[in-house]
Amino acid sequence: MGVVQRIVDNRVFLLGLDRLYREAMKRHERGELLACARSVAATLAVKAADVPVEGYYAEEEDLTTYFRLMRALQNVYAERRSEVGSLAAFQRLYDVASAPLYGRARDVDKLLPTGRDPLSQALADTQPDWSMASLVSTASTCACDWDDFSLVGLAARWGDAVVLTALRESVVLCAR
């Protein structure tokens, strides 16, 4: 048998990493995190948000439910944190939302923090003059300046618009 040699460049590696992340997160979101979101939403009497579903969250009913519950919880003001702060379910959601995997966690006077990744920062810095070249370049500079190794940070460092878009879609729920 001959040896088959394959080249895995940064693009292939990052897209493969993204696939592994998505598959693992889908299982996690359908299970533990959906149960946590339901528990926190019920305690606060918050209904799922009636918003367009983004990314892979449109693929399955449980993922859609999780997405809409999280969007609703993301809009609850921080002053209600005292109602759920002692719940393990809330702490789990808070820990996930704060993970460096999604960029820099920012408390924005809401129940849950949001991640500020290099692409989010590039969108803010270059508005309203968005072009693919300026967004990719600005995101790349930001990732390096911040020493950011989030999923989006890794894609931004590589500087490939397709990879940056794909990995950003995977973290759409936590990053803004």
Image (tube, rainbow, N blue to C red):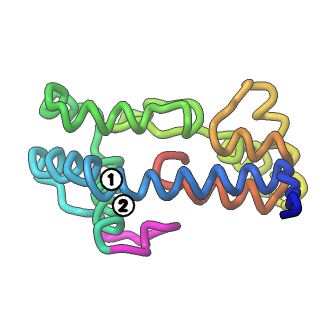
From the image, give the main secondary structure of the stretch colored magenta.
Answer: loop
Residue 52 covered by magenta stretch: yes
Give the residues drawn in magenta, as a range.
50-60
16 left or right of 26?
Answer: right
172 left or right of 89?
Answer: right
Identify the residue at image location x=20%, y=51%.
35
Q: How many residues crowd around disc 1 within 10 Å: few (fewer than 14), some, or many (20 or more)? A: many
Query: Furthest residue to the front?
Result: 1
Percent across and percent down for residue 67 are 36, 60
**Can you identify the residue that label 1 sits on?**
70
Percent across and percent down for residue 120 are 65, 46
Q: Amino acid at mark 1?
A: Met
Q: Quadrant of residue 97?
A: top left
Identify the residue at image location x=75%, y=50%.
13
Q: Nearer the viewer, residue 12 or 160?
A: 12
Q: Nearer the viewer, residue 170 or 71?
A: 170
102 left or right of 82?
Answer: right
SS under mark 2: helix
**Can you identify the residue that label 2 sits on?**
67
Q: Answer whether labels 2 and 1 touch (C-beta < 8 Å).
A: yes
Look at the image and tell me in which quarter the N terminus lies. bottom right
Q: Nearer the viewer, residue 27 or 137?
A: 27
Q: Amino acid at mark 2?
A: Phe
Residue 6, above or below 74: below
Q: Quadrant of residue 71?
A: bottom left
